[in-house]
Amino acid sequence: MKYTNRRIASLLRQKGFKLTPQRRAVLDIICSSTEHFTPVQIYERARQEHPDVGLVTVYRTLNMLAALGLLCQVHMDGRKRSYVMRRPAEHHHHLVCSQCGTVVDFASCDLGELEEKLSRQTGFEINGHLLEFSGCCQECKQK
Amino acid sequence: MKYTNRRIASLLRQKGFKLTPQRRAVLDIICSSTEHFTPVQIYERARQEHPDVGLVTVYRTLNMLAALGLLCQVHMDGRKRSYVMRRPAEHHHHLVCSQCGTVVDFASCDLGELEEKLSRQTGFEINGHLLEFSGCCQECKQK
DNA sequence: CTGACTGCAAATAGTTTGCATGACG
DNA sequence: CGTCATGCAAACTATTTGCAGTCAG
C-alpha cells in the first residue's frame, strides 16, 4: 500500500492545511515515484508544470509533510537532504552507490531482536532505525 | 584496541603530513574520548589549550583524518557533522536519543548475511554500512 | 630552505525567516 | 472575508576556498 496524492490531499485538509496548486505540484512529484529527491530536484520538476513555484515553498511544503510523518529523510552525504514518500507498513532501507549516488531500496531487515536487546541494555525506548549500506554499484565497478 | 594519539602521529608522518601543534591539539581531543564531537565543539576545546587554532584548521584536519579513514562521521540530524575516532576492528553503531542527543554505542550487529544477500541481488560491491537506532533515553522518558 | 600548513576573510551551499501581497475555503 | 500560503530578498548556519605569511622537517 502506498499513500496516494488524493489520500494525502484529504489528510492535509483534515489537518487544516490549504491545498494550493504549489503544494499539489510538490505532492504529484513526490507521490509519483519511489525515488528520493532533494528539495532542489523537486523544485526543478515542479517548475516544468508550474513555473511560478518558489524554492522556498518547496522547502516549506517538505517540512510540513515531514512533520506530518508522510515523508522520510534519506541521509545521503550529510550535507543535503533528500526525501522519499513514506509508505506505511512498507518499512525499507537503502543501498547507496558512493560513486554515482544511485540508490536501491530493500525491505528485508531483521533487527527486531537486536532492537529488543539494546532496549533492555540501555533503557532506551527505541522507535526507529536507519540502516544504509554503501558501496559501488555494478555500472561503476565496470568503469 | 584503540588508535592512540601517538600512533596516529606517526602514521601522519609516514604519509608525509606535518605534525603541527594545531593538529596535535585536535588529535588530543578526539583521541581522548569515545564521544562524538562536531567541528565547532572540537574547535572550542582546542582553543582552551591552544588559543590560536582556527576553525578552518579544525575542518581541514578533520577532513584529512577522515580521508585517511581514521575518523568516522556520525549522522546526527542531517544538517551538521560530528566525528568520532574510528577504532580499528571495533566496528560499532549508535543509539541516539532524539530528545537530548545522548549517543550510546553498541558493537553487536550481525549484518553479514544480509549484506551478502544484497550484494548478490543488486551487483553492488558493499563496503560499509550505517546503522543507527533512534529513540528516547531513560532520563528523557522520566521527564 | 621550501613546500606544506595556518589564519583570515570572503565565497559557497543549503535552508530558514520577515514581510507585504495574494488566494483557498 | 479572514487567515493561511506565497514569493522575494535577506538572514543564517555549516563548510570550503583563495591568498599571503609562517613554520615543521
Image: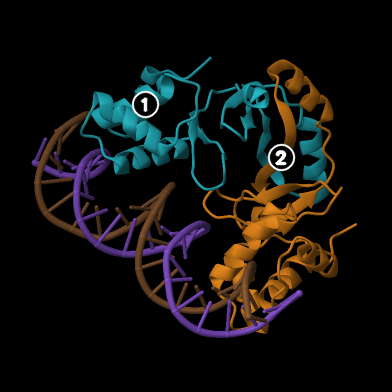
Chain colours: A orange, B cyan, C purple, D brown
The image position of residue B105, as x and y in percent, is 61, 23
Relative depth, front residue between D2 and B52: D2
Answer few, some or many: residues within 10 Å of disc 2's Cα (few below 14, many 20 plus, some between 14 and 19): some
Tell me which amino acid carries mark 2: Leu
Up the image or down, A125 lies above or below A41; here it is above
Relative depth, front residue between B13 and A1: A1
Up the image or down, B1 lies above or below B115; here it is above
Q: Secondary structure at mark 1?
A: helix
Discs 2 and 1 share one subunit: no
Q: Residue at x 66, y 45 (%)?
A: A135
Does A129 sit left or right of B27 as displayed? right
Up the image or down, A124 lies above or below A30; here it is above
Q: Residue at x 49, y 41 (%)?
A: B81
Camera sees residue B22 = yes
Tell me which amino acid carries mark 1: Leu
Q: Secondary structure at mark 2?
A: strand
Does B65 sit left or right of A9 as displayed? left
Can you tell which mark lies on residue B27?
1
Give me the chain letter of mark 1: B
Camera sees residue B15 = no
Q: Quadrant of residue D12?
A: bottom left
The image position of residue A18, as x and y in percent, is 71, 70
Relative depth, front residue between B14 and B122: B122
Answer few, some or many: residues within 10 Å of disc 1's Cα (few below 14, many 20 plus, some between 14 and 19): many
Q: What residue occupies the far right of the structure in this picture? A: A1
Q: Quadrant of residue A87?
A: bottom right
Q: Residue at x 34, y 38 (%)?
A: B58
Up the image or down, B127 lies above or below A116; here it is below
Give me the chain letter of mark 2: A
Q: Which residue is mark 2?
A: A131
The image position of residue A52, as x and y in percent, is 58, 82
Q: Quadrant of residue A84?
A: bottom right
